[in-house]
Amino acid sequence: MVEYHLRTPISEKDARKLKIGDMIYVTGDMFTARDSAHRRALEYHDAGKELPKDLTGKVLFHCGPLVKKMNGGYRIISAGPTTSMRLDMFEDKFIETFHIHVIVGKGGMGPRTTAACNKFGAIYCAFTGGAGALAGKTIKLVKAVEWLDLGIPEALWFLKVEDFGPLMVAIDTHNRNLYAEIAKQVVENKQYIYARI
């Protein structure tokens, strides 16, 4: 395990240096996107429409933040990760289309995302569920919000973060998926135990 402190924009070259089990902290530009935002962004692309902001090199966070409106702006109170597997149906195309190289969420992602990470140079990182207040402390500024018509949790929140983490690399660019490997080991261990009973 190696610890890295990365700054955005994060490139494919940066992502390809990392391996599962590495710990990273991110400083710079992050944006949140859940189901509705993924769907709309890809629909925009397919229709030839520009997104409100360029996503290249920014960190994608699977999160529906708890937000407080104050002094004409917004403050993120808590930013816990949402379950990433729901987004597996979108993520391969999202990585390819918008040049995403770091994704943060919880619970892992499937073979489609793993293959896209390998092909296009992206990593998926796990952030501890239930630690939304910790994440909120590293969010220094809400730079912009787009698509509020989708609702606060589903909107695109563009954030400035400082040492956001710790994040554990759970899918790397070398076709390794920590969640899948552990699941395989569990099955093998279970078979071994059953054989001995």
Image (tube, helix red, strand yellow):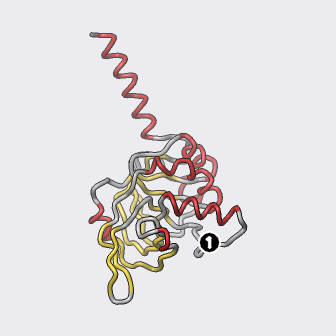
Indicate the quadrant where residue 137 lies: bottom left
Q: Is residue 53 above or below residue 5?
A: below
Q: Is residue 147 above or below residue 119?
A: below
Q: Position of residue 26 (x, y in %)?
A: 42, 65
Identify the residue at image location x=52%, y=73%. Answer: 147
Identity, as a three-letter code, of the amino acid under mark 1: Leu
Identify the residue at image location x=34%, y=81%. Answer: 69
Indicate the quadrant where residue 112 lies: top right
Indicate the quadrant where residue 61 lies: bottom left
Describe the element under mark 1 as helix, strand or loop. loop
Identify the residue at image location x=54%, y=69%. Answer: 9
Q: Is residue 146 above or below residue 65?
A: below
Q: Position of residue 33 (x, y in %)?
A: 48, 63
Residue ranking furthest to the right: 48
Q: Residues within 10 Å of mark 1 (few under 14, many from 20)?
A: some
Identify the residue at image location x=38%, y=89%. Answer: 72
The quadrant in which the C terminus is found is: top left
Whether residue 23 is visible: no
Which one is nearer the viewer's eye here, 48 or 131?
A: 48
Q: Position of residue 23 (x, y in %)?
A: 38, 54
| In-image side of 116 versus 69 (left or right) | right
Residue ranking furthest to the bottom: 71
| In-image side of 178 versus 192 (left or right) | right
| In-image side of 138 versus 117 (left or right) | left
Which one is nearer the viewer's eye here, 162 or 1?
A: 162
Instruction: Say which residue label 1 marks.
Output: 51
Number of numbered markers: 1
Whether residue 67 is visible: yes
Q: Position of residue 96 (x, y in %)?
A: 64, 56
